[in-house]
Amino acid sequence: MGTDGDGRLSQFRKGVVELAILALLHRGEAYGGEIVDRLGEHPGLAISAGTVYPLLSRLKKAGVIDSAWRESPVGPPRKYYRLSQMGAAEFEEMARAWDGVTAAMDQLLGKEQAL
């Protein structure tokens, strides 16, 4: 794929990963390394810490997530992230939009489920 295709794929993945992070935090709070590990359990979502932390910082600045430092049973304190009230509403909206997009794309790609 050419340079332009790589850029489009990167932008596509960034949006999907943002929704994935919100989905993880919708289930409960998590620290950065845990988010990286949990995304890594899904090959299509695996990204580096160097990509996750700037995204978490941007989401925090936007008021979508909150963070708090907590002592760790092993090692230094960890910064835990959780959805803010605004973030919970944004997650619900994004999840509904995702359902509509994936249903439409499944039809376009010929992946409709037989009833």
Image (cartoon, rainbow, N blue to C red):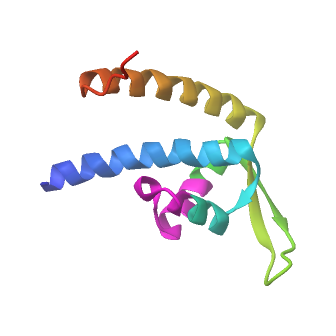
Q: Is residue 42 left or right of residue 24?
A: left
Does residue 57 lie above or below 50 as drawn? Answer: above
Residue drawn at x 65%, y 48% is: 24
Quadrant of the image for the C terminus? top left
Q: Is residue 97 left or right of residue 106?
A: right
Residue drawn at x 77%, y 34% is: 85
Does the magenta portion include 96? Answer: no
- Furthest-top residue in this view: 115
Q: Is residue 74 left or right of residue 16?
A: right
Q: What is the x, y in percent for residue 53?
A: 57, 63
Q: What stretch is highlighted in magenta?
A: 39-57
Secondary structure character of the magenta stretch overall: helix
Does residue 30 lie above or below 28 as drawn? Answer: below
Residue drawn at x 43%, y 58% is: 43
- Furthest-bottom residue in this view: 75
Quadrant of the image for the N terminus? bottom left
- The quarter holding residue 2 reads bottom left
Q: What is the x, y in percent for residue 21?
A: 59, 49
Q: In this view, does 61 lie to the left or right of 11?
A: right
